[in-house]
Image (cartoon, coloured by chain):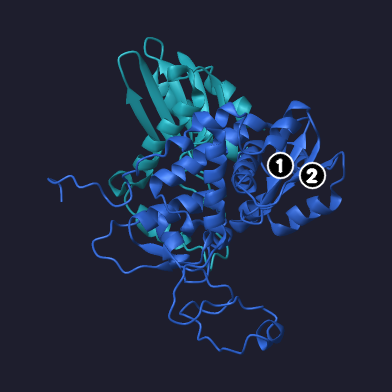
């Protein structure tokens, strides 16, 4: 079963990968990082990426149909009972893609069975980066990271 | 609403005090706990006990942290059924020096490694944030003490200190009043407040005039710092406020009727030992922890200049 580092190293095997990190979007904390990051500071990059991820996750416009209703069911902390195991932290958005002249950033939200707010952030060089592949792989990695 | 760009409440950071700049604190080697810096340098193993929490070190790195103000790893994992309580308890019972709880759970395949690492790291930084708040008593280090959880992913001391400083700044930027961090919270009547997000709504639903942010975090099975962030945002939006002055007893807030038992009878009569209330007619803000903490931080910052 992969840990955080194995997961990030796997992300680094994506074509064109320059850096990969696991980031908490509420606090901006980088829980793990490998490779390089824009500006040379992975903590600063994580904090900035976290802000974008947070805004995206909080906008109702980007949530799928019926998300609010479902969310209302297990968003009740008090009476809690069983969260029926089905993902307490189930972000409304799957991923977020940002492109510029020389690179892509792919942010993949990670659903977890406990309360959290994390995403995988991969920085890809544009000439080699393959967005479709990155999206698929990151989705798989996010699942394996927390589901084993 | 769209044309005029009045800064929404609370999102405009107040002018920064130059003394609070991160660089000043960094030059002093973290600046949060000189003792911690020294322990990291000597690669110490043991537990640093401070007023609001403990940091467990192994060879100078942080392997675990606990604080009464932050829900522990067990709360985070059990609250939403990631682990069954019986499984956790069994691992805790069987843990020894060699096989910590983490290793037992992983070896038995009870929880994926990634999930456990993630949850544990979050819990460590969460508790460390509180453990490293300025305190009025000196910390105490017990050499050699390990933690029954075992080692998962050690974190360098500098990383923990840096993150703690960053978190303080983050909260300060969101809403510069720290009162909501520790006081009981109550909802505020407001007009034209922005709609809270789903996560904030869950926090707001738990606000009842008695619970503090930490209580709410525990109830929701959430990290305490996440709750502090939501609470400060809600405070900035005018949706909740802290009770001030914080009530000393478990009585509901509205100004406790002063019974005036007489100066001699007072303290002995009640086990809760009521504070000497200010004489009627004079309303002085009660001196409480946040103020003292702020003054200490101010003093520390001035000394660092």
Query: Which chain is indicated by disc 2?
Result: B
Image coordinates for residue A51, horizontal then vertical, percent: 39, 37
Query: Which one is nearer the viewer's eye here, B174 or A82?
Result: B174
> In the image, which disc is placed on residue B242?
none
Residue located 35% across and 56% down the image: B196
Chain (blue): B
Image coordinates for residue B42, horizontal then vertical, percent: 78, 27
**Distance between mark 2 and mark 1 Cα atoms:** 7 Å
Image coordinates for residue B71, horizontal then vertical, percent: 62, 54
Query: Which one is nearer the viewer's eye here, A139 or B287?
Result: B287
**Outermost left residue:** B3
In the visual, does B272 lie left or right of B170? right
In the visual, does B175 lie left or right of B159? left
- In the figure, the shade used to draw chain A is cyan
> In the image, which disc is placed on residue B64?
1
Would you say residue A2 is visible in this rendering?
A: no
Determine the secondary structure under disc 1. strand
The answer to which quarter of the image holds residue B241 is: bottom left
In the visual, does B5 lie left or right of B250? left
- Tag count: 2
Who comes first in sequence, dot 2 or dot 1?
1
Image coordinates for residue A30, horizontal then vertical, percent: 53, 32
Q: Which residue is mark 2?
A: B147
Q: Is residue A145 above or below residue A61?
A: above
Q: Residues within 10 Å of mark 2 (few under 14, many from 20)?
A: many
Residue located 71% across and 42% down the image: B64
Query: Which chain is indicated by disc 1?
Result: B
Whether label 2 touches label 1, CB < 8 Å: yes
Q: Residues within 10 Å of mark 1 (few under 14, many from 20)?
A: many
């Amino acid at each position: 079963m992969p840990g955080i580092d194995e997961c990030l190293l796997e992300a680094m095997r994506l074509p064109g990968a320059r850096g990969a990190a696991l980031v908490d979007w509420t606090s901006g904390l980088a829980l793990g990082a490998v490779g390089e990051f824009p500006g040379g500071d992975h903590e600063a990059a994580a904090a900035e990426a976290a802000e974008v991820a947070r805004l995206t996750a909080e906008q109702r416009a980007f949530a799928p149909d019926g998300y609010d209703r479902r969310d209302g069911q297990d968003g009740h902390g008090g009476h809690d009972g069983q969260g029926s195991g089905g993902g307490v932290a189930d972000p409304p958005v799957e991923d977020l893609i940002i492109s510029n002249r020389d690179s892509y950033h792919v942010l993949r939200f990670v659903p977890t069975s406990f309360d959290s707010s994390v995403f995988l952030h991969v920085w890809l060089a544009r000439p080699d980066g393959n967005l479709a592949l990155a999206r698929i792989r990151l989705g798989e990695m996010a699942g394996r990271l927390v589901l084993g | 609403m769209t044309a005029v760009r009045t800064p929404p409440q609370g999102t405009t950071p107040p002018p920064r005090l130059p003394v609070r700049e991160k660089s000043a604190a960094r030059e002093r080697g973290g600046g949060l706990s000189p003792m911690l810096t020294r322990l990291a340098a000597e690669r110490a193993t043991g537990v640093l006990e401070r007023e609001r929490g403990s940091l467990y070190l192994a060879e100078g790195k942080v392997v675990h942290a606990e604080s009464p103000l932050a829900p522990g790893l067990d709360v985070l994992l059990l609250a939403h059924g990631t682990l069954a309580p019986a499984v956790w308890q069994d691992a805790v019972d069987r843990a020894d020096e060699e096989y910590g709880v983490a290793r037992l759970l992983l070896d038995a395949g009870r929880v994926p490694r990634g999930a456990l690492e993630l949850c544990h790291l979050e819990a460590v930084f969460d508790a460390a944030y509180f453990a490293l708040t300025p305190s009025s008593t000196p910390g105490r280090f017990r050499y050699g003490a390990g933690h029954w959880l075992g080692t998962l992913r050690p974190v360098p001391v500098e990383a923990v200190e840096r993150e703690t400083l960053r978190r303080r700044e983050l909260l300060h930027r969101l809403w510069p009043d720290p009162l909501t961090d520790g006081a009981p919270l109550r909802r505020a009547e407001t007009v034209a407040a922005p709609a809270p997000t789903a996560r904030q709504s869950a926090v707001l639903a738990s606000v009842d005039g008695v619970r503090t942010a930490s209580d709410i975090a525990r109830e929701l099975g959430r990290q305490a710092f996440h709750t502090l962030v939501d609470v400060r945002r809600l405070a900035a939006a005018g949706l909740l406020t802290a009770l001030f002055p914080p009530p000393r007893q478990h009585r509901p807030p509205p100004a406790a009727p002063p019974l005036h038992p007489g100066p001699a009878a007072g303290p002995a009569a009640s086990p809760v030992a009521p504070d000497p209330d200010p004489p009627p007619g004079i309303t002085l803000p009660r001196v409480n922890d946040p103020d003292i903490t702020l003054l200490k931080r101010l003093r520390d910052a001035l000394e660092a200049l």
